[in-house]
Amino acid sequence: QCDFAAASSAEYRTGQSPMSARKLAVQLLDRTEQEKSYSNLLLDHALAQSTLEERDKRLCASLYYGVIERRITLDAVLSHYCKQPLRKLDGTVRNILRLGIYQLLYCDQIPARAAVDASVKLTRSCRKASASGFVNAVLRSFLRDDCRIPLPKQPEKAMAVEYAVPEWLLKKLLDAYGRERTQAFLADALQPAPRYIRRNPEKCTQEELEQALGERIIPVAQVPDAYQLHAGDIRHLPEFQQGWFYVQDLASQICSLAIGAKAGETVLDLCAAPGGKTCTMALQMQGSGKVLAFDLAQSRVGLIAENVRRLGLTNVTAMQGDAAVYQPELAGADRVLCDVPCSGLGVLRRKPEVKEKQPEELAQLPPVQLAILENAARYVKQGGVLQYSTCTILPEENQKVVAQFLAHHPDFRLCPVLPEWGGVFAEPMLTLLPEICGSDGFFVAKMQRK
């Protein structure tokens, strides 16, 4: 959502900061389309290099994420007011228009005239001055029509525009969850994502953490040691630097707790970066045993190691490794977690560009996921636990992969994910949706070797 406070303060100040915030947002939108990069990585790097004031950085971030989240809705508007197909527009001009429409629709505290004028100025600032009249005409036409979104007559097409989701994905979600639950999930995906943290019991008590962070944290009743955090850049918090807590979404925390790691055991985390699950499992083991954490990319192994170092964990080893390639020396593990690469549709509210993936890309994932699960099973000792998880909510990447695995592995059986929690958590295959506990969308299946 548009950062109203930042927009309001920036809008009425003199100087070039507000325009610079918008210009950086357009530049990032251009790069996102060209490089197919994750929005959070691009934004974090750009803001770290930027000289913008903090409130203008917030405005840039909210505009940038907002356009990505609402791109399908914005393009439906532009298609109605542009005579030529959007694909034929210059990419930068297209993003300037998207940014303008987004401000008119969703940024109530930015005056309409200011949003239009700023968009026209952006064409000059971005060296697209020849398009200034065109941008002005499109935005003013939309204003004259009271900023009404033109919705198709067909219900599913209208729903796709309203919730800014591709039609093929909407159909998959409707088939799996029905209209009401799909609407709830997609509406949540358009809201700011909450930030959850987990206490490090090796560094501080519950009382110490709650006293230090005060009103910035709210305990999560259902998940022990979990809190919702309301703070800016946590890297500057002394408690973060000292390893008192780490950032981990509730779904990831639940997944880590479900595996049930115990003191003295050997646990494998086959797709571990950035290391949240690794750390939670290691802390369950109270400094004993060993957690071997692997990731395919060596650069991401460094993220695991950094988390482990900051939290002061001594029973974790992070290393590079391919989860689909068998390493016989690792056989005989007590528990194996494979949180496999997936479409990421469960984390739309954090990575809205996931919606831009094509169905052909998703069709290639289940064979890869099954191959990793097949390999992971080879490491589990008799009586040991094998856990499969994804951050997607599509059945073809979740239940269907597990069913295919079990059909060829009668020596494994499903068992309850978190039986002591009851309800949906006691199921052997758990699909988490934001409506359940406020977490991201997630899937967990727990199996035991007979």
Image (spheres, rainbow, N blue to C red):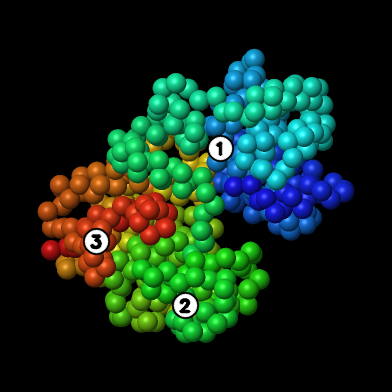
Mark 1 or mark 2, which is nearer the start of the sequence?
Answer: 1
- Mark 3 neighbour density, 10 Å: few (under 14) some (14–19) many (20 or more): few
- Mark 1 neighbour density, 10 Å: few (under 14) some (14–19) many (20 or more): many
Determine whether the residue tagged by mark 3 lies in a helix, strand or loop: helix
- Mark 2 neighbour density, 10 Å: few (under 14) some (14–19) many (20 or more): many
Q: Residue 277 location, x and y as percent? A: 41, 65
Against 316, residue 49 (above or below) is above
Which residue does the image show at 78% across and 50% down from the upper left? 10
Query: What residue did someone put label 2 on?
Result: 200
How far apart marks 3 and 1 lie (CA) works out to 35 Å
Which numbered dot is residue 423?
Answer: 3
Amino acid at circle 1: Arg
Asked whether, in this view, residue 111 is left or right of residue 413, the answer is right
Which residue does the image show at 38% across and 73% down from the upper left? 224
Res 186 → quadrant: top left
Which residue does the image show at 51% across and 54% down from the upper left? 193
Of residues 312 and 28, which is closer to you in this image?
A: 28
